[in-house]
Amino acid sequence: MLSSAVLAAPALAADPIKLELKGYFQAFITLGHIDRDVSGTTGTSYRPETFRYEGEIWFTGQTKLDNGTTVGVRIELEAWSQGGGSTSTNDQIDEEYIFAFGDWGRVEFGALNDASYRMVYAAPSALTGWGFQDPNMGHRGNGFTASNNAGRAATVTPGMSAAMGANSGDANKATYYTPRIAGLQIGVSYTPEFNGTASAAQCASRTSGGNFTNCPRNSNEWHNALDIGVNYLNKFGDVSVALYGGYFNAGFDRGTAGGANNNVGGIIPAAANANGRWKSWATGAQVAYGGFTLGGGIGRDNNGLKGDNATRWYAASLMYETGPWQMSAGWWGGRNNEKSVASTTAQNRAGKDKIDMFEVGGNYALSPGIKLVGGFQYVMGSGQSKSEKADSWAVIMGTVLTF
């Protein structure tokens, strides 16, 4: 893909690729409450305070060829210990890929998120690191996380794009973005296969990419994933408008129960035949005027499962920005009937699950690259068990550095 783009004309580079260092670090203290839930068979209570952080260091380099095409590479190192290895689903490198762009558009190849994930416009958030689009941070109990399936990919994680980190994520893929014409841009991604339980050394890993020796067939993995993202950006006088749509579709390459990379029936533990074609769609919009940005989105994600096990989600928020200040208030809601998936524990019971997340927050820019962040988040769960109903709330205080 990249070779065909750069060889369209004589393509000598004026300068070799030089790497530059960028990244971010997010550090937070949360003070609050998490309802007592059940993790496994043990009742669990939680401390009121939590210290947490997350960060990445980005190595990026590019050069412009004489034919006008720019070619580059990006490697994102996690700035915290993942404890991973070749047999783990964790990976110390987040995304790694090569890219090229010019008047003809942009191509990317490697381990990174899909086009619809990177093009999303929906409910904005001033609470950096949190928000409703696959956030880095969350304040929830372990039992609630393991049992309530009203979030994306039958988890408790919110999200507003068609593709998510919990489906194809950072599995190896190829992506093409068209040039933006009259405000409209289209992105298309193709992922050969992915699986939530594949280790970092396996072809189907969705947390990493690499030099895999082979990609077996019939190994209980989703495959041939096609993702399409579209957005439209324009300004009419003093009003800015952003519209978004995304669609994700992947088949399931069924193998024998207990076979290599077996997903044990799906994201929700169940019978081995519960998996099916993964289908997800999302729409969103933002309108900005006079420092205010109003945004929201809706969508549906069948979580890669057969039957009535889809998550229906909704989001809305309002953000205001003036000088160094940003402030926002928003809501994200997920609903999952969870009808045809057999429960395997007393806490993960079949039946309707609900999650409602409410967030108020803001940030203040002390200087370029340094922000003070604070806010409040309330997570309300509903379901058939104690863990599925476990609520939580937190006062959030933190510092976000970008460099």
Image (cartoon, rainbow, N blue to C red):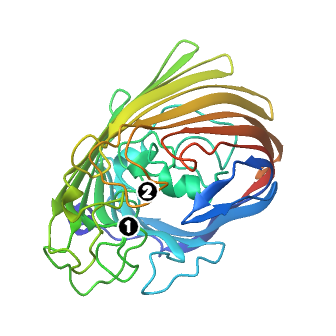
> Residue 165 shows which numbered tag?
2
Residue 89 lies, with reference to residue 28, above or below; the image says below
Residue 231, visible in the rendered structure: no
Which residue is at a point 39% across and 79% down the rendered structure image? 199
- Compared to residue 222, the image places residue 131 above or below, namely above
Left or right placement of residue 95 versus residue 115 in this view: right
Give the mark nearest the N terminus, 1 or 2. Answer: 2
User: 303 left or right of 323?
Assistant: left
Which sits in the foreground, 247 or 41?
41
Mark 1 — residue? 206
Please state which amino acid type lies under the numbered disc 2. Answer: Gly
**Do the CB atoms of the residues marked 1 and 2 lie less than 8 Å apart?**
yes
| Residue 7 in picture, x, y percent from top left | 22, 66
Callout count: 2
272 left or right, relative to 146: left
Quarter of the N terminus within the rendering: bottom left
Q: Position of residue 135 (x, y in %)?
A: 58, 50
